[in-house]
Amino acid sequence: MAAGGTNDTSTVCSMLVDLGCWLAVGVTGVVATTQVLGWSGTRLLAAVHALTPYLAIPVVVVVVAAMWRRQLVLATVATAVGVGIAALGTPLAYPDQQPPPIAGSVGLDIVSINLWYQNERVDEIADVLAELDADVIVFSEYTPSHQSVLTSSAVAARYPHRAERNGDRPTGVAVWSRWPLSDNGLLATYHSSYDVTVAGPDGDVRVVAMHMVTPFDDVGGWQRDLAIARTIGGTTDRPTLLIGDLNSSYWHPGFRQVLDAGFVDAHAAAGSGFSTSWPIDRIVPAFVRLDHALTAGGLVSTAVSDLDVPGSDHRGVLVSVAPAR
């Protein structure tokens, strides 16, 4: 009886392991399929898509376990799913090469910062900006209180040219420039987004400062914001930088469509496409990149890096851009 009971327990455990393995492979396979088909119309899918690269970890475990247990069918299916996810990430590991910048070009250094609307350490951010001394600053979640602190800081005098639209909670946006800028108006995005032209040392550069809504707040609004970005990439005929908290990662099909429309992601071009920018204020480490600098229309990125922003939940982005040869 004891031996029979042990065998029954072992059989049940084996069945549960098989069920768990197939469940892990099945869920990951469904996610990969929605990626290929471009489906991202629900909050749940948007969340799961952001975690796509991490889903490869249990798939690898399943492959190893299936090979050890000599379950050829399970190992084959799991391998196919893992290869599919790897294929999705190939452009991040092997990005297309950008053309070189025009010889002798000066370029522009542009920093993008999500201030976080509840941030009470904005005076420290002003000190960070003074040290960076970038040519252009893009602020998102730019509230009236943030505006008051920043415009009263010593760094404000370096940026006499501004396009600003403060707002409650995450809706405000601002562009500060040491070079003259032309205000092309606000875009029809969920939050305020500015379209400006900066008269830089190498000529005019269009800077689109965008803060997309999160799919958890309004998935339809998020998709419309992505569509606006896609239209800009597909129609711009001049050096253009789209920069800001886009609340989208490479693993969202809609964001890859923005890249396919004509934009190049500066982080991917620099070989750091797998880097992350959010969250930086939680127990869990940052696990997804939501903050981007995208170039199009004959503009190329020559350097890109991330920076810690006091009191924010996002890392900032500092990008150097120049006209392409």
Image (spheres, grey):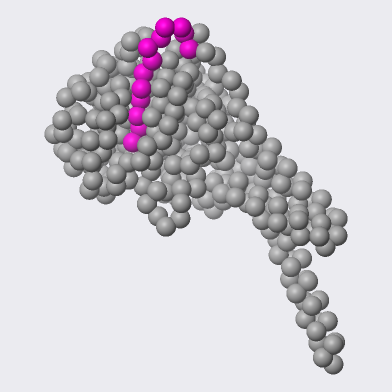
Choose between 260 and 280: the one closer to the eye: 280
| Residue 139: quadrant of the picture | top left
Looking at the image, can residue 234 be seen? Answer: yes
Q: Is residue 233 above or below residue 81?
A: above
Q: Residue at x 33, y 17 (%)?
A: 197
| Place of residue 146 in the rendered image (x, y in percent of width and height, measured from the top left) | 21, 40
Magenta stretch, residue numbers: 101-113
Q: Residue at x 54, y 53 (%)?
A: 44
| Place of residue 215 in the rendered image (x, y in percent of width and height, measured from the top left) | 46, 46
Is 103 one of the magenta-colored residues? yes
Looking at the image, can residue 186 be seen? Answer: no
Q: Residue at x 71, y 65 (%)?
A: 20
| Residue 186: quadrant of the picture | top left
Query: Given the current orientation, which residue lies at the most extreme left position?
Result: 152
- Image quadrant containing the N terminus: bottom right
Whether residue 181 sits left or right of residue 84 in the image: it is left
Is 170 one of the magenta-colored residues? no
Choose between 315 and 143: the one closer to the eye: 315
Query: Given the current orientation, which residue lies at the most extreme bottom position?
Result: 1
Whether residue 322 sits left or right of residue 164 in the image: it is right
| Place of residue 275 in the rendered image (x, y in percent of width and height, measured from the top left) | 50, 39
Query: Given the current orientation, which residue lies at the most extreme front position?
Result: 131
Q: Residue at x 18, y 28 (%)?
A: 156
| Place of residue 40 in the rendered image (x, y in percent of width and height, measured from the top left) | 57, 44
Q: Is residue 233 above or below residue 275?
A: above
